[in-house]
Image (cartoon, rainbow, N blue to C red):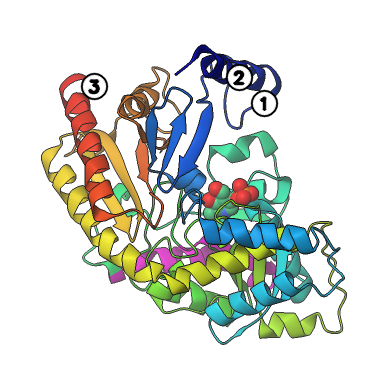
Amino acid sequence: MDTTTKSKAETIKEKSLKYNLQSWSKQGGLNPIAVEKAEGIYYWDYDGNRYADMSSQLVNLNLGHGNREIIEAVKEQAETYCFMGPSFAVESRATLAEMVINLLPDNFGKVFFTNAGADANENAIKMARMFTGRKKIFSRYRSYHGSTFGAGNLTGEPRRYPLEPGIPGFVKFFDPYIYREPIKFESEEAAAAYYVAKLREQICYEGPDSVAAIVLETITGSNGVIIPPTGYLKGVRKICDDYGIVLICDEVMAGFGRTGTMFAFEHFGIKPDIVTFAKGITCGYVPLGGAAVSKEIAAYFDDHFLSCGLTYSGHPLACAAGVACVNYYSEHQILNHVNEVGKVLGEELEAIKAKHACVGDARYIGLFAAIELVKDKATREPIVSYGGDPKGVMGKIVGLLKQKKFMTYSHENMILICPPLIITEEQLKEEMAKMDAVLDIVDKEML
Ligand code: PLP
């Protein structure tokens, strides 16, 4: 590497630190990697170091870096025209909406496109409120739905706090987080029945006629890949049916193949009323999100004013990227691949859990996984307490992984493992060996 290249990396880094505010961080002491190039599951810094993208950036880069089909589709759209406002009929926008509806169950009718996940949720709850004429919105504590005001109020975890006291009528309930539940259930069904009964009771006390929507991440993502027990979502669906409440599944992170089905709710035999999506629909090549609504909700807006709008709703470049992504998922049988490689990931994680004293739980479905680090397997005491890690233990562990060029992020006491869906078995094994080595250090030095 010559000095000119080196100085370019340093310049970019310095400028970035001087002018960019970085998300979810104290701004002092940051040390971003200046990225020179990226391909497949890897990216490289200007010193030629290769990093494995084991979180698919922010669990959005499902098809990895440098996908030629997506790049060419965006180029072609840019050559045709880059932008036409949402009121125009645009080929990529109409085609992508049709493709999304065809991927969803037969009760789905239309799509409202947004820029990303947060505004997908914002618009979903607005539509649910207009459709039902009700105001209250239920969502869960261990959830992340975005950082804008409405989506931030749906969010239950600490990233909600700066928005407090929050929007009146936004009610939180507890998720079926069995690993940390003091009650020990006989079966998944028994656990599901318990949580559903508690939710029904809470809805009754809030007044069912005032509840517009229940919003949930079908499988909780950044809060630790919490997979609902068998029967839970069917129970929530029944509550919604009994009281005329709109069921909104936030599939921003879990959707588009991450769990081995196109949408995560397919694992649980339910049909939501609204599905929000973002991330994997364009894999970050151009930002895009959306809320797909049922035929019934779509029909309601035939003669009721849809009070939603964004300058960039269904941006043609983003929709062109989306069409290319959705085509790629089917033409390259990505779901089959996720299920095959996901099986290997599951085996690796079970082995890691059995071997390491610090691994309390490993949860995985498809290529969506998290390990939960504990001080003591028997008591399940987390390695860092909820909402607090004053000694920066999790940062150190993620730092050890980074030294080995295994790149991911943590949340509370959990580490996410969500590689691009195109990862090969060989690549996965190479990276999981690095995780194993880091957990050896945690076992020996950090408990
Ligand atoms: N919903 C879920 C489940 C998410 O994981 C995220 C982001 O991580 C969002 C919504 C917000 O999406 P965005 O950051 O694109 O606004």
Q: Secondary structure at mark 1?
A: loop
Residue found at x 82% / y 75%: 89
For disc 3, the marked residue is: 446
Neighbours of disc 2 within 10 Å: few (<14), some (14-19), many (20+) = few
Cβ atoms at labels 1 and 3 below 8 Å apart: no
Q: Secondary structure at mark 3?
A: loop
- Magenta stretch contains residue 213: yes
Residue found at x 51% / y 44%: 58
Gap between marks 1 and 3 measured at Cα: 32 Å
Gap between marks 1 and 2 measured at Cα: 7 Å
* 153 is higher (above) or lower (below) than 164: below
* 327 is higher (above) or lower (below) than 392: below
Residue found at x 38% / y 57%: 422
| 25 sits to left or right of 334 | right
The amino acid pointed to by label 3 is: Met
Quadrant where the N terminus is found in the figure: top left
The amino acid pointed to by label 1 is: Leu
- Magenta stretch contains residue 293: no
Nearer the observer, disc 1 or disc 3?
A: 1
Task: Tell which circle, 3 or 2, labels the residue nearer the N-terminal end.
Answer: 2
Cβ atoms at labels 1 and 2 below 8 Å apart: yes
Residue 394 in percent (x, y) is at 37, 27
Whether residue 214 can be seen here: no
Neighbours of disc 1 within 10 Å: few (<14), some (14-19), many (20+) = few
* 74 is higher (above) or lower (below) than 294: above
Nearer the observer, disc 3 or disc 2?
A: 2
For disc 2, the marked residue is: 27
For disc 1, the marked residue is: 21
Q: Secondary structure at mark 2?
A: loop
Magenta region = 189-218
Task: Tell which circle, 1 or 2, labels the residue nearer the N-terminal end.
Answer: 1
